[in-house]
Image: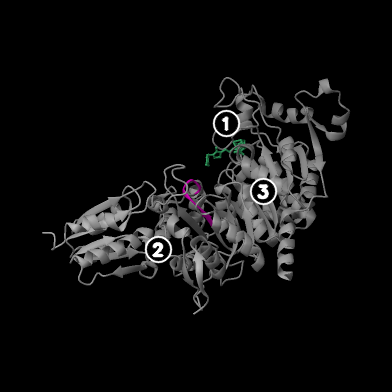
Amino acid sequence: MANMNIYELKEKKPYLDYLRLDKLPHIWCPGCGHGIVMKALIEAFYNLKLDKNKLSVVSGIGCSSRLPGYIDANTLHTTHGRALAFATGVKLANPELTVVTVTGDGDCAAIGGNHWIHAARRNIDITVILMNNNIYGMTGGQASPTTPEGAIATTAPYGSIEPNFDTCELAKAAGASFVARTTVYHYKQLIDLIEKGIKHKGLSFIEVISPCPIHYGRKNKLGLKGLYDYLKTNFIPIKAWDKLPEEKKAGKFPIGLLYHDDSREEYCEKYEKLIEKLSQN
Amino acid sequence: MGKVYLEFGNHACAKAAIRAGCRFYAGYPITPSSEIAEKMAELLPKVGGKFIQMEDEIGSMAAAIGASLAGLKSMTATSGPGFSLKQENLGYAYMTETPVVVVNVQRQGPSTGLPTQPAQGDVMQSRWGTHGDYQAIVFSPSSVQEVYEETIRAFNWAERLRQPVILLIDETIGHMRERLAEPENVEIWNRKKPSLPPEKHLAYKPEEDDVPAIPNFGEGYRFHVTGLHHGYDGFPTTDPKLVQEFMERIQRKVLRHKDELLKYEEYMLDDADILIVAYGSVARSAKYAIKEARKKGIKVGLFRPITLWPSPEEKIYELAKNMKCVLVPEMNMGQYVLEVERAVKGASEVHRINKACGELIYPDEILRFLDKFSPLTV
Ligand SMILES: Cc1ncc(C[n+]2csc(CCOP(=O)(O)OP(=O)(O)O)c2C)c(N)n1
Ligand code: SF4
């Protein structure tokens, strides 16, 4: 297996068909969670038997946002923070396309925050995968809106004094009709949630904790094992979470499908109905 | 001739966009451009197109580009502060060679400035607003009729050369009601389609005319679009040779069509020894002033560029070299005059009238300058 070339591997792992194998190796550092997210994503695409010609993967700027370049689809690597605004144009112009955006915590929750909450409010049929590493990876470890208070970043050398966002709460409050959280440690769940998110009609928001050992891990002296152990111990399946006494919830997060509402109408469908109505007059 | 009626400038823009085949509009309200969005919101769904009011101008520019990549002719309109917000993604459209029409109904600035009053302060921004090197294509109509015609021309060139085309409309023109004669027939250009099958096609490989046949998303050509420098396959590259080649090509694809792109009006220039260069609403005052000046024996004429960028520099030089002087009145503190001075290359004296207080430049103000050349007053 070790010597097996990736093209041969494709026979055993048919989901690799969703990758542009000639664009590998990818840019991510050893130990980075982003590659795990990509693998889960293509497995989900494969399980859903998505037509690659009708699939568009859109991103902003950051390490996470380099992901679309490796996917064999209609891929769009845009400007920092704007993935969802570009994706809104793509989806509304051609609602036949399955549109997935991949984004980082800086990309989505800082510079792109406005596009994010408004895409959620419109409930447009886009699946948003936020690859949260609690830091700006690409630019060298600056603090992001999800950097926990007290954590060290290059722009918070004495520990961040800012409170951080709970992105799932925010997405839900903004109107996303499907909200989930998981981590790259919970790999099977990750695939499952991406599949469910894509199938859901409306805006699906999935936060995936995806560690950055190079910046977040190093600055905070967590080590690779520490980073992944943290995912194992601090992220609690929603059923167990609901039974957890309040005093045990501090520093921990629920994972799984946190919220969904299938009754809300999707944006592009509403628009098509409007066109239909006007054409009858 | 088609329908003839009284029309509002901004509405003429929206109607012409639909006529040109525009089927997607994304925008954010801002005076004095909002009526374009309002008209598009009304008209687009009636023709099966899509309108969306985005959360800001950054998002509007982004959505318009996304829709264009998905195959629809698309447009956004804005003013002053909104035009500033669009700049980063405007650069993305130059880089990714995405057709899109961007309308800027100019208002007085900088900053919030005078939101409801006219200015021509964005002439240089329309040329150099986003970072890096590119060739802007900018049209400046002078009447409601021309708003209609130039909007169609903007779509045609955006599609043909695969890049943004900017329509700079003065507030005065956007908010003016005037006679509009809709042309019976208009020529419509569409973006070219790839001639090779997906497995052989390279999305960013330029063709003979320096323009690549970039497919639309969803049509079976799976390819990558990025604002990073990219090779013929669309994937990131830092190869200096490829980057330099790209940079030269995106200038060349515009400049090689310059003769076709340039549009201007020459008014009473045959015997003129004084040249006025004016565009947009100021050209209207200039014409009035010229008529009055000629009554006093002053031989003055007007060169009115409709295509501001690429600039008609050779034409300006040819005209200016035989003139006593050149006058550039503008509703700004001196912008296009810099281009005129560059074009004239010292062959004639270049004078300016600059007004940026929210008032129009009145014919009298131009006349006052011209008066000193009157043979009757010597
Ligand atoms: C307008 C703009 N501002 C700043 C940057 C610089 N920049 C590039 S990536 C990045 C942060 C990326 O962080 P995140 O979104 O969390 O993704 P990660 O790299 O951690 O995956 C920044 C600030 C940029 N490219 N564009
Ligand atoms: S810097 Fe961090 S986020 Fe970026 S690739 Fe490396 S580990 Fe991953």
Which of disc 3 and disc 1 is earlier in sequence?
3
Mark 1 sits near ligand 2, with its Cβ under 8 Å away: yes
Left or right relative to A133: residue B258: left
| Discs 1 and 2 lie in a common subunit | no
The CA distance from mark 1 to mark 2 is: 52 Å
Does dot 1 land on a helix, a strand or a loop? loop
Q: Residue at x 33, y 49 (%)?
A: B355
Q: Report the residue marked by disc 2.
A: B142
Pointer 2 chain? B
Question: What is the x, y in percent for residue B295?
Answer: 21, 67
- Nearer to the camera, B177 or B238: B177
Pointer 1 chain? A
Tell me which amino acid carries mark 1.
Gly
Q: Quadrant of residue A105?
A: top right
Question: Which quarter holds ligand 2?
Answer: top right
Q: Residue at x 77, y 41 (%)?
A: A179
**In contact (CB < 8 Å): disc 1 and disc 2:** no
Q: Report the residue marked by disc 1.
A: A141
- Nearer to the camera, B51 or A183: B51
Q: Report the residue marked by disc 3.
A: A101
Pointer 3 chain? A
